Amino acid sequence: MMMTTAFMVATLVAPGAAAVAAQEEVKVHTGVIDGAPYRVEIPGQWNGKVLIYSHGIYPKGYVPQEIELANRPETKPVLLGKGYALAASLYSKPYGLSVRESVRDQGALLDWFTRNVGTPRQVLAWGASGGGLNSVLLGERDSRVDGVLAMCGPVAGGTALVNQLLDLGFVVRTLLAPELEVVRIADPARNVTRAHEVITAALATPSGRARLALANSLAGVPGWTRALQPRSATVTEQIEQQTRFVERVYDELIWGNLRADVENTAGGNPSGNTGVDYRQLLSHVTERGLVEQAYRNAGLNLAADLDELADAPRITPDRSAVERLTRLGTPTGRAKAPVVTLHPVGDGVAPEHERTYGARVDPSQIRQLYVHRGGHCQHTAAEELTALSVLEYKVHTGHWPDVTPRALNTMANRYGPDYNRLFDWLHNESGVMQPAFTRFRPYPLPR
């Protein structure tokens, strides 16, 4: 099936005058269900379909001014103009790893929608970052979901993610600062502050940068996290990009309050490294070459550091906590609903998650799409709408369209510049990017 069929062309096109007019008739519902605020927007010409959006991991205390209904604000007028109802719960616990709350609260919102608006003829779950994982879990656990679009999420599961981040913290603690805590953190705020001091000092020296490269790379963080620029040719800049990403996205999950929240959710420590051979892990990570070059530049002995990691006391997880987090937050891949995933190849939330998750899914039920770009969730509205149209086609026809990069980029190019803008919040840069769907096969997760 070619993507240029009439259905694909008509599914999600840029809004014209009719779409703008339709937005004026949008009815907005807000409220709270069992402690979970929600927002629903319904166009006057509702097509019977609902898109239920799951947000990512918020820091503790953060509340958005308006509940997110899409990853890119530019997509809302397109979707409403085509008749889609948009819905989202903020969850009763909006911060941290809310895998349990998201499935329960989004399900309750669908119940509310059926009672107060009508029974949808189609429900699509979609989300970005942690919301990508939440959407996959919702698709597996709620039979009303007809399809899932998971964007830039840790879809291999929460247990895989916390083990990645434990590896990063373990390397930093062992090689740079033994006073840092990585599990059962007594004072998360103080621990984060000290970690920042250690990392800032390490960035200032070749040996420190080499050890940061090792830690970051074992967690799957690429040396390219800049959305509007090509990958840097310099080792120092690549390590700085890795480290900036970790500090802005992962630090609380490694050193601080979000790590404590994970342990609270799991009922104990769900991550450990008993039996982990870091020398073996390094042999099959994406950024192995960056690590080796950084050590050469520093005149540092990589083998000696790997020996030190091998000799360091290991962290033993609580078995019950591992089982609980696995049960709550690890997809099985056995959903009835088809799944589309979308990921930048240079995302610090490692695209390696896609390969691990994809191996669990019936190949006839999944398509995994990639854009050639750095940064977390740095796909344009045009690219996200294109991925959504791929899912819609599968749900509508039972068949997958053409998902070659050429076909996908052709579809994304139907949108104008306003749908191809990006803001790289990590580097405070903005600009218009061309559609960049590409062929890509991630490495497996290190473990």
Image: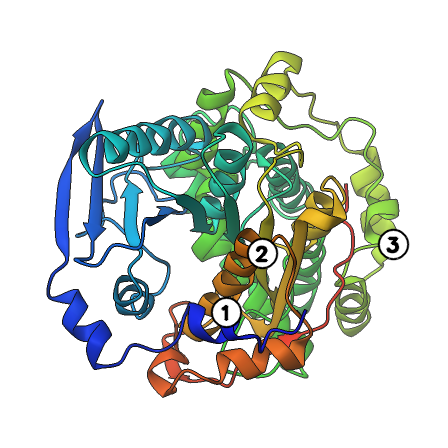
> Which quadrant of the figure has residue 348?
bottom right
Callout 3: SS: loop
Please say whether residue 176 is visible from this viewpoint. Answer: yes
**What's the distance in space between the residues labelled 1 and 2, CA to CA?**
9 Å
Left or right: 415 in relation to 240? left
Q: Could you tell me which quadrant the C terminus lies in?
A: top right
Q: Is residue 181 above or below residue 167?
A: above
Residue under label 3: 283
- Report crowding for label 3: few under 14, some 14 to 19, many 20 or more residues within 10 A (C-alpha): few
Residue type at mark 2: give it: Thr
Q: Residue 7 carries which label?
A: 1
Among numbered discs 2 and 3, the one appearing first in the sequence: 3
Query: Percent from the top left, x then y, of residue 430?
Result: 37, 81
Residues under numbered marks 3 and 1 in contact, where contact means CB atoms less than 8 Å apart: no
Callout 2: SS: helix
Residue type at mark 3: give it: Ser
Query: Percent from the top left, x then y, of residue 177?
Result: 60, 43
**Along the viewing direction, whichever of 56 and 48 lies nearer the viewer:** 48
> Which quadrant of the figure has residue 144?
top left
- Report crowding for label 2: few under 14, some 14 to 19, many 20 or more residues within 10 A (C-alpha): few
Q: Is residue 233 above or below residue 109?
A: below
Query: Percent from the top left, x then y, of residue 405?
Result: 66, 77
Left or right: 43 in relation to 1? left
Among numbered discs 1 and 2, the one appearing first in the sequence: 1
> Which quadrant of the figure has residue 260?
top left
Residue under label 2: 397
**What's the distance in space between the residues labelled 2 and 3, CA to CA?**
43 Å
**What's the distance in space between the residues labelled 3 and 1, CA to CA?**
46 Å
Residue type at mark 1: give it: Phe
